[in-house]
Amino acid sequence: MKFKPFRVKRRRIPPTVLSDICLIVHGTELLHAKHQNLIAQPEESVYRVTPIELAQAAKRLLPHITKRQKIALALPSSEFVATTLNLPAAAIQNINNVVNLQLPTLLPGVTEPLLLAVQPPDDGEQTCALWIPIKRADELFQAFDKEGLFLSCILPRPVVVLPATKIPCQVYDEDDKSITHLEWSGEIIQRWLYIAKEENEVEEFKTQLEETLSIFKNDIKQKHKTNVDDWKNLPIPPPAAYGYAFIPSGAAARIAQTAKLKKRRSLSSIVILFIIGIGVGIYIAIDYEQRLKQHLTELRKRTNNVSHLGAEVAEIEENIGPIKNFPRQQVVNILNTLNKLIPKNSWITSCHIEGGIIKLEGYSPNPTQLIEILTAEPRFMNPKQSRETRKEKGRIELSFGIDFKLRDFDLGTYWLEYFPKKRY
């Protein structure tokens, strides 16, 4: 008896939207997709497609834009190279590395470094990998940066009109120089056909084109973009389009730096909130103590009875004893110590200190190393994981939880002395 192998369908991670504005190059025209907060000039003519000319045209088109706004640049298909892949299921988990290793076979003779955009296929399906020279992408980023613009990613022009839903479709993109026909299904590009028009005039190439087009399915929706007017007043590209975005190295570095600064601000906010909380607690304690002292002074003025006054003083001292003798957790010193101990490649997202017990949560490539570091600190004792480490989507580091105690914090003795009848 044969059993049908059980296949777990891999959950596809939605692409990250990498732009606020999308510019589209078509022939000698530079257009922009709709954006509610954008005030732009009429479409610009691009006499050359050099990075400098494109950047200058973009600046004229978007005179009020700042570097905070991310720009996606949709280039004609002639800027890219497409290869068709049939990959085993085991390769899907690390598809970018697998495809990059096949580059000499997929594009023999190509020696210049290339950027890759590819999405993992479903079982039994094929996918298309798109490539663009790293040099071209970096030159475009640098040219835009010189004009005060942030080019966050580069898109192949046909993917700009992909559907926002999972409905399969075909896109036919034609300009003065070339024809591109792609088939979109299962949230991936399964087929990509590109031909230069000058080749299409040759009868042999024309026949080959017709034979290739016959492979495409005829029962799904088609989008035809045959002239520049078809690319005007388009909406912002859907999230699925950014699965085929090429990110220049300069843009990747800026995005990483922004994320790093955001993490630092989050940690700073946590520290500030802790300090404010401590300050409020100290103020309340001091205010309470001052009011008790004021009450003691008033009692001393109202009586000359030394024995009675002594009894009241003792009572007041007993009342403020729980405040004066409460074990101090030295929160600021603890935070400073953690800041020095935690490696730069790790960070804390949550820190809870109560009753001499410290609970940390955060991200680290090596949570076990953090436990060893905390164990070596004399002021801490019994560091241990509070939950299993796990890897979250889109992150390289592992999520961790660690609990440990303050060595010199004795809340039990304090509680027995002042609140022997109450449990804590």
Image (spheres, grey):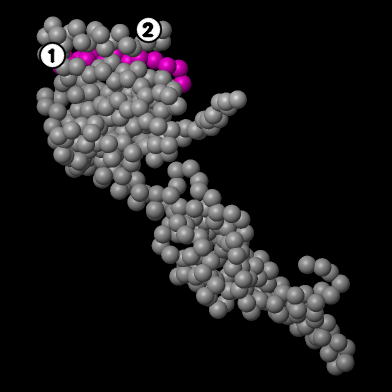
For the record, the magenta segment spans: 166-179
Instruction: Estimate how packed mark 1 is, as few (under 14), some (14 to 19) or many (20 or more) residues with alpha carbons within 10 Å.
Output: some
Q: Nearer the viewer, residue 332 or 246?
A: 246
Seen in the image, is 186 located left or right of residue 355?
A: left
Displayed quadrant of residue 340: bottom left
Q: Nearer the viewer, residue 23 or 288?
A: 23
Mark 2 lies on a secondary structure that is loop
Query: Residue 218 bears which disc, if any?
Result: 2
Query: Residue 353 bears which disc, if any?
Result: none
Residue situated furthest bottom in the rendering = 306
Q: Residue at x 22, y 15 (%)?
A: 179
Q: Residue at x 43, y 37 (%)?
A: 90
Q: Residue at x 80, y 79 (%)?
A: 417
The residue beneath circle 1 is 199
Q: Which amino acid type corresponds to the residue marked 1 in the rendered image? A: Glu
Locate residue 273, reporting x and y percent. 55, 60
> Relative to 175, does residue 105 appear above or below in the rendering?
below
Q: Nearer the viewer, residue 106 or 278?
A: 106
Seen in the image, is 401 located left or right of residue 291?
A: left
> Relative to 181, does residue 344 appear above or below in the rendering?
below
Mark 1 lies on a secondary structure that is helix
Instruction: Estimate how packed mark 2 is, as few (under 14), some (14 to 19) or many (20 or more) residues with alpha carbons within 10 Å.
Output: few
- In three-dimensional space, the C-alpha distance between marks 2 and 1, rounded to whole angstroms, equals 25 Å
Is any part of residue 33 visible from this angle? no
Locate residue 1, reporting x and y percent. 60, 25
Can you say which quadrant of the picture contains the C terminus? bottom right
Locate residue 364, reporting x and y percent. 47, 57
Displayed quadrant of residue 309: bottom right
Residue situated furthest front in the rendering = 1
